[in-house]
Amino acid sequence: MAAPTPNQTLIGRDAELEEITSQLGIRAVSGSFNSSQPPVRAVLLSGDAGVGKTRLLTELRDVAFTEGWQVVAGHCLDFGDSALPYLPFSEVLGRLATDLPDIVAKVAADQPALNRLLPGRRVMTEGESGDAATVDRGDIFDAVHALLETAAEAAPLLLVIEDTHWADRSTRDMLSFLFSRPFARRVAIVASYRSDDLHRRHPLRTAAAEWARIPGVGRLQLAPLGTPAVRALVKQLHPDPLLESDVADIVDRAEGNAFFVEELVNAAWGGGLPEDLAGLLLVRLDRLDDAAQRVVRAAAVAGRRVSHPLLASVVSIDDAALEQALRHAVETNVLVPARGDGYAFRHALLAEAVYDDLLPGERVRLHAAFARVLSESQGQGQSKGTAAELARHARAAHDLPTALRASIDAGDDAFAVGGPDEAAQHYELALDLLADERLAAEVTVDMAALVSRTAESLIVSGHPDRGLSLIQAHLAALPDDASPTSRGHLLFALANTVMVAETRLDALELTTEALAHIPDEMSALRAKALASHARALAYAENEQARPVAVEALAMAESLDMPHLASEVMTTLVGLENAGDDDAVIEALDEVVKRAAETGAVYAELRGLYLLGRRRLDRGQFAGAREAFQRAVVRAEETSQPWAPYGFDARFMDAQVAYLTGAWDDVLRLTDVSGQQPPIGPESLLAALELMVHVGRGADAVAFGREVRPHWDKDGLIAITAGSAMIDAYGNRGDAAAAVREHDDLVTLVSGMWRSFFHARVRLAALAIGALASSVEQLSAAEREQAAADVARLRKGADCSLELIAEERKSWGPEGQAWAARLEAETLRFRWRAGIDAPSVDELVTPWTEAVRLFGEFGHRFELARSQARLAAVLRASGDLAAARVHSDPARATAHELGAQPLLDELQTLGGTATPRAEAAPDTLTPREKEILALVAIGRSNGEIGKQLFISTKTVSVHVSNILGKLGASGRTEAAAIARRRGLLD
């Protein structure tokens, strides 16, 4: 028998494998299914083509081999009307004749009919005819049964017959005989077939039903893979990370079919259907008669699903012929009845294949027919479809005026029901059509309003950058004689986009100019512009924000615009930056409640986000997370999870989870599996996920590089991911790469924001920390370069601190903590490098301050890291008790977070053991004192060896002795102890 072959891991079929092995008695599984029932003799394995039957059978074969079974397999082939009787059993007999020739010869001697199935005897010789060529079928059945039973004497035997939907009549009869006649030995049979091939008149349909009623015959239907399994399969087939949108597309199109998944993954990401897969799918169409093919082609133009009335109106054939054609398509599993009064394709990819196979003229004609029927039904008040369907068909039929009007209507419909992505697509299609000047002249459209609605849809769907570009392009294209109102409309729409996009444009300048163009009179447009102006003033901390907001609120209430009124009230409450925080929080709660009552989702999300931020500023982490989570849930309920404030709340919830040490929550919140986020939000969440992986010690540099191309989408992506990458290189001990990462990050963000942005303090502290941790392993020349890097990084960070002081901006608790950490890491570098080394007191003071400030801020990981480094300084000074005060809680936090790099750093500090006795000066030999002096000034082992004319290995031995005598954990601590005890001249 053939031995099992190594293969990829079975995905998504563990339960089915467990069931079939248990049913057949190949491997008993404790607690699975009903182990009290005796094993069945046979299992009928069914499932759609490509769903994974062969893969499951391959795994079953390997399990059977492992359990000591013999396995033989035969395959039915699609020979149409020229099928060769007993073909799979001839294959089985050929395999047994090779592996067990003695047994086959013995059985053939007793059962001569068996020879008729040997592969070499399948072709009748020239002189053989008549009775000589005829063998009783019963003899053949008995011979095969005897062969299987005899072969099973040595070890249990598993017989697999694949693709029995192609089996000839003789093979089906053979299986019926084997299923119904017991074996004296352990023989198990599995017969597989495609359930989607069994149309009503298929001969196996009746046979399978009869087999299932035979005692000892079980059934196992393979359902499509679930979404998690499909995702795992995609990852196995394509180990390199893919965008979530690409993965989601495969999941959606493959519909759980493993073969479709493989073909789509192997495709060139062009969005189309792989040619080989299309050809395979179209084989089904060839089995239909002309009328059924005509109906199916029309259904493919409609899309995945089509209603019966709409299809009947388009194909224009009499009811009886239509019903007959549909029945044929359903029986052959091309179409399936859908809910209601319609039909759907058995597989979405089959619909794609049929549509792609249409001739160009055929497509246009069918689309035109659909557009005509839909337009007429709308005119009669009995619509047979949606505006979106009409827009698609009219556009494909080149009926551009109808397509334009329907696209705008479809966009309005989609936005009204919470579909911003779809709304944006429809609006953008309308704008594309309006690029044709002749069409623009034929159909009257308020271009400014359409552009504004399109931008709003793009913002809510998480694509503010696209909305920004769209409005800027249309503003630039406005003629000089354009209506001032239209220009003002576009300007305040641009301002709204600027306030949620990554750009250096000034929203206040834009709203000021917009108001100058919009007539100063009571109007909805003026009210919206005033509301935008109030927000822009609030962002700029301008004292005029309140009176403008009050004016906007009064106008919105006068014009009965409750959504706008709720948004303006949110702005007014957000202006309360001083005074009674409890009163402000209460006011925000009230604003959120009113927004929810009026259905002003944007205002509700913004209010919840501001509520979370206010609680966060007060250090109320639990309350902040509760507000952010409410915003996330509301955004998901209204189908706008990537909208401003909805997504911002999700990101902030994940950030607070990271600060408070709820790292598993971070991974849950950043998991976008099954979602289709825009690249900006996806990258921002991936950056936070990266921070957790790096903190836990994963070598996540490759993952970080996948995020890097998207740094320019948002400065926050760059800073979050870049911070993690600096630490990742630091964990590797590659401080030079950490510095390069810092420099690249500063260059990029400086271009997006300004040169001395606030986060430079944090980035410099991290990079200098990486240099300080690795400096002992550097040569003298490398230390000089590292010292120069520290000075340069520190200068840039100091410039940022000076700019903050000049602007008199509040420097919150996080910023203060990082400023203290920057000073502490700088001194730690000088201490460990032996360059202008500070005293212990000079070191302890900034590290103590960093510990205090990170503790007050609530950043558990950075608090623990600061405690570990303060403990290292205290331990080197000989104050082991004080060191343990900080190292023990740091170690507990690191264990809780799973922060392995921090645990490794703490390992050098030891536990709570009693202090070791210090060595007396005279316990060091003269050579050891000489080497200690060179260690203290930063020389490497190699450099010391060259200077003293001894081998590097000898130097290493001396250094180990020195560390042991001084009770030091490393070279830096040894140098510190030596200075403190006067061992250095």
Image (cartoon, rainbow, N blue to C red):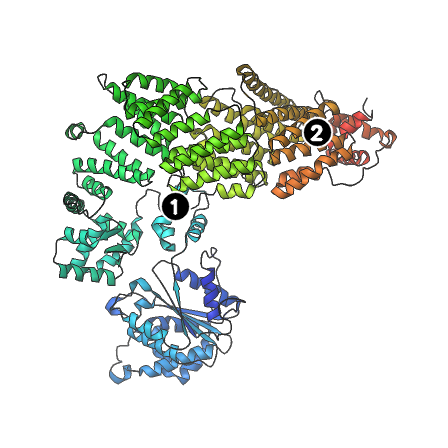
Who's the residue at 76% across and 41% down the image? 912
Q: Secondary structure at mark 1?
A: helix
Name the kind of residue labelled 2 in the image: Ser
Residue topped by disc 1: 248
Residue 972 lies left or right of residue 700; in this view the side is right
- The quadrant in which residue 130 appears is bottom left
Q: Is residue 57 above or below residue 540?
A: below
Expressed as whole percent of the image width and height from the top left, the position of residue 365 reads 15, 45
* 784, 178: nearer the viewer: 178
Separation (CA) of disc 1 from disc 2? 53 Å
Viewer can see residue 705: no
Viewer can see residue 207: yes
Label 2 packing within 10 angstroms: few (<14), some (14-19), many (20+): some
Could you say which disc has been placed on residue 361 in the image?
Answer: none
Label 1 packing within 10 angstroms: few (<14), some (14-19), many (20+): many
Name the kind of residue labelled 1 in the image: Ala
